[in-house]
Amino acid sequence: MKPLLTFFLTLLTCSALHSQTPLEGAWDGAIRIMGTELKIAVTFRAPRDTPAATIDIPQQSAMGLPLTNVIRELPRVHFELPAGPGLAVFEGNLQADSIAGAFTQGGVAGTFYLRPRTEGEASQPAEGAVPYKQEEVRFTNGPVTLAGTLTLPSSAGKHPAVVMITGSGPQNRDEEIFGFKPFKLIADTLTRRGIAVLRYDDRGVGGSSKGPEDATTEDFASDALAALQYLKTRKEISPAQIGLCGHSEGALAAPIAAVRSSDVAFLVLLAGPGVPGDTLILWQMTTLARAGGATDGEIAEAVRLQHRVFDAVRTGEGWEEVRSSMSEQMGKSMEKMTPEQRQAVGDSATVIASRVDASVQAAKSPWFKYFVAYDPAPTLEKVRCPVLAVYGELDMQVPPQFTMPPLKAALEKGGNKDITVRVIPGANHLFQQATTGHPSEYGALKKEFVPGFLDTLSTWVVERVVRQ
């Protein structure tokens, strides 16, 4: 979700040593900011490779984001993540078996650390043979080629099917987050119960081509419909029984696709937003900031700046005021940094100017403009196929008490006669068993769904399809 929590981060707002601890490989760690830890994982590749390094950020539901300006002048290690709105900069030092240093993004300062991943860490157990067929497939949507995995029940006949749609940010077909593979687990459960499943890499990830730079949620809905059309060409699939299952932003794209095409037989919406994007961003920002220890004054200042950004996005005016406010907020944040952090960041004026430029550029992106303005209610009112909406009780990204009522109300207003809404006790945004639901927990939790989630989803689907 481009990931919703990016806005929270932004607006709160030695050769011998190298031979002992080479950078190449996976490193796990966290960003420490405003009293909380945000889990990350960085994979360094050989300097000649492109990209030279990638980062995983579980709270953004994002994997394999390419890092830029990767510098390995050991012991100095520097890398940057173009994220919206705000360039995230990591300036660290390699010491023994760890990397630690300063983190800055969009006026916010903190620290980060990384440690080499131990063998087998952050990965799910090895799997044995499965009682169904698995096939690598490719399909196209205009200039974009999408690669994925189709799982098919081994029994004969035309099977019902589900197309999976990931949340925000570039993700692989399993929607993999710190070794947790939600879509692979869902596909396994559904296929064992007689439902074929197609899951595919997002644009620019894995085997899928990147496509145009101006993609929005509507384009992701179009990708899902291309997947559905591909399934209709398969002799093993019942063309009248193909549904869509979207998670987070994917649960915004799925209803768009269903309204565009009567071929969509049903929808499964996992943590589906029921309010406009600007409203959801503000709720996330204040809730997560408060959970992270931000003061009321800091939160109020961040909210005021975010409103200025929204106004500028809507009208195209006021960007200079936004730039000025961002610069002021970033300057205040830098004043709170330790001397070591300031030294690591470098010339403050240059850094601030660079960060503000990156933040404004990201806020002007087509994806952000679309997301801020998009209200899912009018689309939901037009959905006529059966809908299952599932939420995690402790979800802090798409909280059920805040987003579920308007989603259900919109479906009912449109006259939909088959609506099922479920809240899974103790579950977070990823439907893991959680303690608080805060994104900082994601990487530390068991890589499995909370009990009852898979049964809720699969039973509902099976009850709404007929084998042919």
Image (spheres, rainbow, N blue to C red):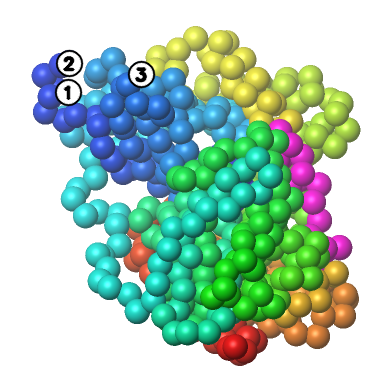
Q: Is residue 29 left or right of residue 237?
A: left
Nearer the N terminus, badge 1 or badge 3? 1
Q: Is residue 64 left or right of residue 466?
A: left
In magenta, the rendered stretch is: 365-380
What secondary structure characterizes most of the magenta part?
Answer: helix
- Residue at the spot 62% in from the left edge and 49% down from the top edge: 140
Q: For marks 3 and 2, give the CA distance.
A: 14 Å
- Residue at the spot 40% in from the left edge and 35% down from the top edge: 54
> The residue under label 2 is which amino acid type?
Cys
Residue beneath label 1, please?
18
Q: Nearer the viewer, residue 284 or 117?
A: 117
Report the number of numbered marks: 3
> The residue under label 1 is which amino acid type?
His
Residue beneath label 2, please?
14
Q: Is residue 351 visible?
A: yes
For mark 3, give the secondary structure: strand
Relative height, residue 248 to residue 52 (above, below):
below
